[in-house]
Amino acid sequence: ALLAREVHQRGYAVLALWSNHVTWRDTAAGFEFLAEVEEQATVAETLEVLRQSAACLPIAAVFCGLDTGVMLADVLAQHLQLRGNRPMARGDKQVQQDAVKAANLRSTRSVKGTDWNSVKAFAETEGFPIIIKPAEAAGSYGVKLCHNACEAETHFRQLSWQLQLQGRRNREVLLQEYLKGAQYVVDHVSRDGVHKTTMVWVCDRGPANGGYVCFQQQCVTADTAVARQVIAYTRACLDALSITEGATHAEVMMTETGPCLVEVNVRCHGAGGVWMPLARAFAGYTQVDAYVDALGDGAAPFEQLPDVPPSGSKGSGLLLPLLAYHDGHVGSTHFEKVRELQSVLLVKECVHPGTRVEKTRDDLGVVGMCALWHRDPAVLASDVEAIREMEQKGSILV
């Protein structure tokens, strides 16, 4: 919705196209779409519906808002002769790793399948722990660090059953080597194969409630040695995946042997856009701004963007998912306790009174998101500690 809003604010009418694989619809754009249409049985039929809905207006650009629309956006852009990437199964994490490996870049050892017997040899030879997750998914859905063969087989079979039950297009499950090190998120926007970094984050990820979650994402200055290294590596990965246009959100582990790709999401940074005021405070612009610049008319707006975010920021900031450590129905919420803290810029509420909440086990199970920024690192650290205490005590949700 935030991407659509930015496009609309620049004077364009916006058509919302919902792909057949979309699992939820964010319609809170704050304005009225020119039309909302569904993906049809064929590309030709979808194009015809789009043209009819656009009436006499020319279709100027195709933007992808969610992971489920990546392939459709590329196909439509190709048929409309608009900016887009060559269509391929980029959402498949095994396809990504194979492309990166073929480019002689450090890649993650992995294998995928729908039957445990076809992948168990990898688990036996790789050794434990290993990561098991869907071949195509987002928000750490289904990601589990498995410490032995029994745990791995149980999660593999459970995940296969869940993907089949959900009617997923890709029901394959991926086994990956466990990468040790710090995880970085590198956001880019590209035009004509030129990649510009819009933000670098370092993530604190780990086990929680039997799952695997992100505890926080902290802004990283682009002129640091580690940032320069992960930026250069990420851009090489984008080239390996033939990504020349649009927004990307890459996850990279800094291992003992250097950076290694976890996955690339071919869309903007997610988290409900809570990160946007933090990015503006840190860099002066956002990935959403740059995405519209990249796909818009004329090269000048994109060319004027810096290669990496400016390093003159005089503060510290981070993105903090709010986690649930208790199961139950929500009687009342107290997000105002978080908003009252000095460094909090924005809080997004993901649950409301009457909602049933389960313990947070992945990024999709957070109960809220907040962006924090302050010139004094001590104030920021104190506020984070206060929020973590509220989560443990269950004082945000009662």
Image (spheres, grey):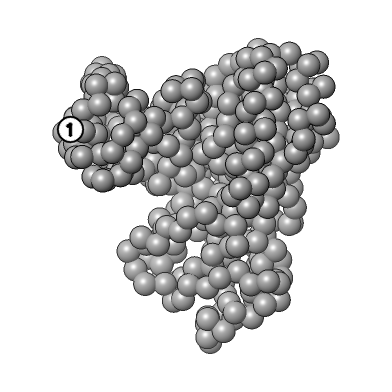
Q: In which quadrant of the rendered image does the C terminus lie?
A: top left
Q: Nearer the viewer, residue 234 or 370?
A: 370
Tell me where residue 223 appears, x and y as whole percent. 51, 27
Tell me where residue 233 appears, x and y as whole percent. 67, 30
Classify residue 288 as left or right of residue 69: left
- Residue, x 44% and y 22% (percent of image)? 208
- Residue, x 64% and y 40% (percent of image)? 161
Classify residue 62 as left or right of residue 206: right
Residue 208 visible in the current orientation: yes
Q: Classify residue 105 by image quadrant.
A: top right
Q: Nearer the viewer, residue 10 or 2?
A: 2
Q: Secondary structure at mark 1?
A: helix
- Residue, x 40% and y 46% (percent of image)? 272
Q: In which quadrant of the rendered image does the N terminus lie?
A: bottom left
Residue 225 visible in the current orientation: no
Please count the marks in the image.
1
Say above or below: 354 vs 128: below
Q: Nearer the viewer, residue 274 or 356?
A: 356
Say above or below: 47 vs 128: below
Residue hosting label 1: 337
Tell me where residue 132 appears, x and y as whole percent. 65, 28
Tell me where residue 65 appears, x and y as whole percent. 52, 55
Classify residue 370 as left or right of residue 164: left
- Residue, x 31% and y 34% (percent of image)? 328
Say above or below: 87 vs 17: above
Few, some or many residues within 10 Å of mark 1 (<14, 14–19, 20+): few
Amino acid type at circle 1 is Lys
Classify residue 13 as left or right of residue 337: right
Q: Classify residue 284 by image quadrant.
A: top left
Q: Nearer the viewer, residue 271 or 368?
A: 368
